[in-house]
Structure formats: C-alpha cells, structure tokens
Image (tube, rainbow, N blue to C red):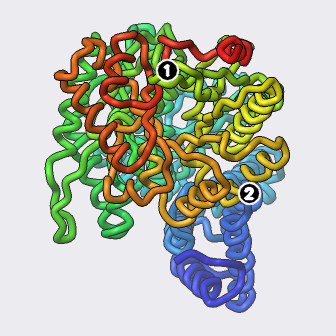
Amino acid sequence: MTLAGPTGSDRGSLVAAWARVLADSGYVATDWAAFHERVGELVDVLVGAHAADEFDQAAVERVGAGLVELRHLAAESIGGTVELIGTHLGSGPRVAKIQAAVTAGFVRAAHARIFGEQEALRRSALEARDGAESARRASEARFRAVFTDAAIGIGISDTKGRLVEVNSAMAAMLGFRIDQMLGHFLADFVHPEDPPELHRYFLEMVAGKRDNYRIERRFRKSDGTALRTNVTVSLVRDEHGAPQYLVGMVEDNTEWHVLSEQLRHQAHHDHLTGLANRAMFTERLHASFGDPRGERVGLCYVNIDGFKAVNDTLGHVVGDQLLVEVGKRLDELVSGPGRLVARLGGDEFVVLVEHTSCLTELIELAERILGAIAAPVRIAGHRLAVSASIGLVERSVFDASPAETMRDADVTLHWAKVDGKNRWAVYDPERNAREIARISLSAAMPAALEREEFYVEYQPIVSLADGTLLGVEALVRWAHPEFGRLGPDRFIGLAEETGLIVPLGRWVLETACRQAMKWRAAGATPLVSVNLAARQVAEPGLVDDIAGIISEIGIPSTSLQLELTESAIMGTTGEPLEALRRLVDLGVRIAIDDFGTGYSNLAYLRHLPVHALKIAGSFVEGLRAGTKDSVDAQIVTALVTLAHTLKLDVIAEGVETGGQADLLRRIGADSAQGWLYAKPGPPEDVERWLR
C-alpha cells in the first residue's frame, strides 16, 4: 500500500502501527495522546519526503533523531521503523533512501546521546578525583549508577589495555560474566579478523596524543561469532595530565550492519530477477576499462523479441515471470569469473565479458544465449517460446570509453532488430558511420530546403517509334555543402520518414511546372513527369495544393504527369484513391513507376485512374541480349500486352543500348528513357533536344 498524502485512513494506519511498534520496544515517557500526535508528525515528514520531487535528506534524518528524542533507542525500535516504512510506502529507490536516511538520523542522534553520557562519565571521574570526600562519594555514586545501568556497554581499562571495570551490558553483549572479563586485556576479545592497524588509535591515546576516538570494531563473542560494534573511547588523565584510564563505550550495530548490507544489495541488484542492475553493471564496466591486467572487453546487449506482445496479451505478471526465467537462464549460462549478467530495465539484459581473447569467443557465447532463450517455458499454464536479438561489441579497452562501448552495443542491438530479430549483430564502424551520416542528412534536410540546396534535373522521355521528345521526368538532387551532389536514393527515404517529403515534393512539382512554362514560352510542349510519394498521396490537401500550383503557374493540367510506385498506388484506398481520381478529373496524368517490381492485383489495377505504366529498369536490363526468347523479354512482352489491353501507355526505364531500344520497339513499348538518350541534366540539356 502506498500513501497518497499526509492525511486519510492510510496515514492513520501507519501512525497506529508505528506507535505500537515503539511502545512494544520501549517505554513511552509521555501520555499516549501526545505520543500518538508526535508519531503522526514524524509520519507526515516521511510521507512528504516520499511524494516530493526533490528528496530532503536532512528532514528525513530528523525523523530518526525524533525516535531518540522519544527515548526509543532499542534496536527493535529502528528495525521495526524501517520495516514499517517498506510495508506502508512500498518499494523503489525513494523508499530505500527514506529507510537509509531515517536509520542515519537515528544513529547520529544515538551517538550524540552516547557522547553526552560519556562526557557525564568523564566529569564524574574528574569530580571523584578532585572533590572533597563527600563530594567524591556522591560523584562516585552517580558514576556508578550511570555505569551500571547504562543500556550500552562500558568498559574501563588501564594504559596497558587491561580491563579494570566492565558493566553488565558490555558483558552481556559478548556473552561473558563480568568476572570473566576483568583482568583480561581488551585485545583478548577483539575478533582475529579485525584489521590490526586499528590498534594504532589505542597507542596514540596511551601516549597522550589524542583524547578520544571513534571506530567501528568487531569483537569475538563467547561462542566465537563476531559482534559488530561502534566503539567510542575517551582518555582520563591524572592530576598531572598523564594518561591514566581509557573509558570505552560499545554499541551493538549488528542490525544496522545487516540493514546496510541489504540496502547496498538493493542498490546494486535488480529487484525482480536478482541480477546485477544498471548501477552495478556501470561500475563493473568502468572497472574493466581501468583494470591494468585487462586489454580487451566484450558486451552482449540482449533484448527479448516481442516482449511487449506478451505483456499486452497475457499480462504483466506473466511478463515478469518470463523475465525472471530469462534472467535465470542467462545467469546459469554466463555467470563466472570475469563475467557479469545484468538487467538494465524492461526486457533488456547485458552480459559483460572481461579479458576477452577475440570476437569469436563473443559470437559463440551469443549463439548459446540465443539457444537458451529460445527453449520453451511454461508460465501460468501458457507455453511460451520467445527469441532474442543481441548486439555484440568486442574491443580493446584502449580504443574507446565505457560510455562509447555501451552506446555502440545499443546501436548494434538495433541493427539486429532491423535485420530481422532472433539473431546477433556485430558492431561495424563503417556501418555506424553510414548511419550517423544518414541521421545527419535527416537533421540537415529542413534547413537545406530553406537554403535552396535542392535542385531539379530532367531526363528526356523519347518516342520509340520516331525518337522524338515526348516529355521529361523531373528528378530532385541535393547539392550538399559537405557530401557534394547526392542522388534521391540518399535522401528521399529519409524525407518520407520525417514527413519532409511533403514540402520537398511540393517544391519539386512547382519548380518542374515553372520550367515547363519556360519551355512552352519558347514554343515547346513536353510532358513533365514528377514523382509523387505515398506520404504525399495521403495528405488531405494534396488535390487542392496541386490545383493551386497549376492555376498559379498557368500550366495546362494535361501537360503534367504524376508518378507513383507500384506498391504505393496498389495500397491506395479510401481518401487517397479518391484524391487520385480527382487529379485525373483535373486532367493530370497518373503513371505507375517501377511496374513489375511490386505486388499487383490485376483485377484492382483495371479500376485505378492510371494512364501509363513505367517498366522497371531491372527488366529492361535483361534485354541486352536483344532476343525475344529470353525470360526478361517474355516478361516485358506480357507487361506491354497487359498495359495495352488496359489502354495504358508503356514507358521503359533504364534503356542504355540500341539493342534494348530495338527489342522494346518490336515488343510494342511506346516510349523509353535512359542513358542511351540522355542522362538526367539541367534544363539546358533538354533545350538542346527541343532545338
């Protein structure tokens, strides 16, 4: 249950539960109503910290200090508090921070109280030494009361480290009787695995170089187990200022240590799968690059294919169980010295391989991972079989940084997805450079259109019967300031993805129409053919836009031909199809470009508002032999026959030899374009044809 705010039944339940925990673990020094109200104030601070955008560490630490102010110093008080926070506020990084801050505030306040008691003891010792006999006895009585009844362990030793006084709390902590400890050296009770360098603090104190110190120390209990403690030691000097006694206060922090370890584990492990999380993986990856023994490192970036479909159809509970199973398989397959499996989030896992020998090692591991994940698993009555895509990066640690390596693994994972999923892909710097260039082109296109970096070239369309010029196809080019002249294959696809094809296509259409009017003014009337992308056809205002251009420029609509690819025009239904019909009603011609390369429904084709078919250059390429018996010649013959049956003109693209042109003429094609006649060029090249 997660509290939504500082009021309501949820708040009341947390206040009541917390008050009961504190009452059960210690004495309530105030009346119950005031105590309940104070607990409510602390609850409001915790709830506010949980809901706030910015985490207030100091405010939450004061909640822990508040427990000490209420005199609830027992381990059960802070332990129960931390448990209640997790129960009522849920889980997650914010809750872990709240638990840690409350504990830290509790410990600091408790330590401050200890220091106060310590000072009281030291003053009592001085008063016992310097006061009159009656005052000395009174002071000694007070000291004895504090010493005997203190909740924390207290021991007094001489300057050689021999124990001369031990209270019952100290003896109980270690599991001894008081008489079993007196006369023994403190070192006899120190855990043998405790760092020996901690002994220097004792030596400095008996030498009079320091008056107090505080350390975390492990003692050996009577049963041989370790007791983790916080130890605060103060020096008592004689009347001459020489070291005489050492007073040590020992606080059991075993539960705090266990809680710290739990929080540390939560901070570095995924709560669902138990694998390392992103934080631990990042730390280990950076360490791999800084390891002087390592020269190479490898990453397998793993993503489950179609995981969203599992969540959407079977639910997140099944999805989570699937992630647990995948994590288990990866852990069993991969984990070992020099290897780490981590879940980065969602359905993404990563395998770090340190000290790799070569790329082959990583590829073999990727194959085993694909096989392990592909094995069916039964979850909640469902038999699930999933696949994965993996991005592989294997390189020298001196060639890149950890961040760059992780970025490249992410990019390579994307390649594996794009290439068909259920596979691995290896990082390729050249492919990455092409992808970056592609992204750069996409980002530069809007500004390039504004800066008029695009221009139009024209390729003649020639009658196969007599070689006269029938029209021209307008082809857009990009004069890129860095990459030079770019053909449409480099940027048209990007323009369609980004939507820039709409303004770019309009500009090409307008430019071509204006050029056609210049030729008409010179007495020539060639047909102008302009490519139209599927994205443009889907635009609601396409017909009005084209009609506006025709009206504004004054070009006859019958002099304009719009080309759509076979796949684009076959997919037109509803409003896009109606748009094509309206364009035909205006007098605009429609042609199917690259016919024969897509999937055509012939029954549907005869109902489309189309005037011409342009046979794809791949078929024309097969006519180089010049014989009508070849497979390509028979295909082209069938296409021409089909087009003429539907009363459509046939234009052949990519004609490069006279033999191709002669064969197309005999087959019955109407017109052609290609390098045999002219390459795409500026308007001046077309004007030479016209002359």
Q: Name the residue under label 1.
A: 466
**Vertical position of residue 656 compared to residue 465: above or below:** above
User: The C terminus is located in which quarter?
Assistant: top right
Residue 67 placement: quadrant: bottom right
Residue 553 x %, y %: 83, 41
**Mark linked to residue 544:** 2
Q: Horizontal placement of 85 versus 31: left or right?
A: left
Q: Horizontal placement of 678 versus 220: left or right?
A: right
The residue positioned 70% from the left and 47% from the top of the image is 557
Residue 82 x %, y %: 54, 65
Q: Do the residues labelled 1 and 2 touch (CB within 8 Å)?
A: no
Disc 2 residue type (three-letter): Asp
The residue positioned 38% from the left and 66% from the top of the image is 312
**Vertical position of residue 101 compared to residue 198: above or below:** below
**Vertical position of residue 185 compared to residue 534: above or below:** above
Label 1 neighbour load within 10 Å: few <14, some 14-19, many 20+: few
**Vertical position of residue 435 compared to residue 536: above or below:** above
Disc 1 residue type (three-letter): Asp
Residue 267 x %, y %: 50, 47
The residue positioned 58% from the left and 28% from the top of the image is 470
Residue 405 x %, y %: 48, 22
Q: Is mark 1 on a helix, strand or loop?
A: loop
Q: Horizontal placement of 358 versus 377: left or right?
A: right
Label 2 neighbour load within 10 Å: few <14, some 14-19, many 20+: few
From the viewer's perspective, is the residue at label 1 or at label 2 nearer? Answer: 1
The residue positioned 56% from the left and 71% from the top of the image is 89
Pick whichever, 71 or 307, lies toward us. 307
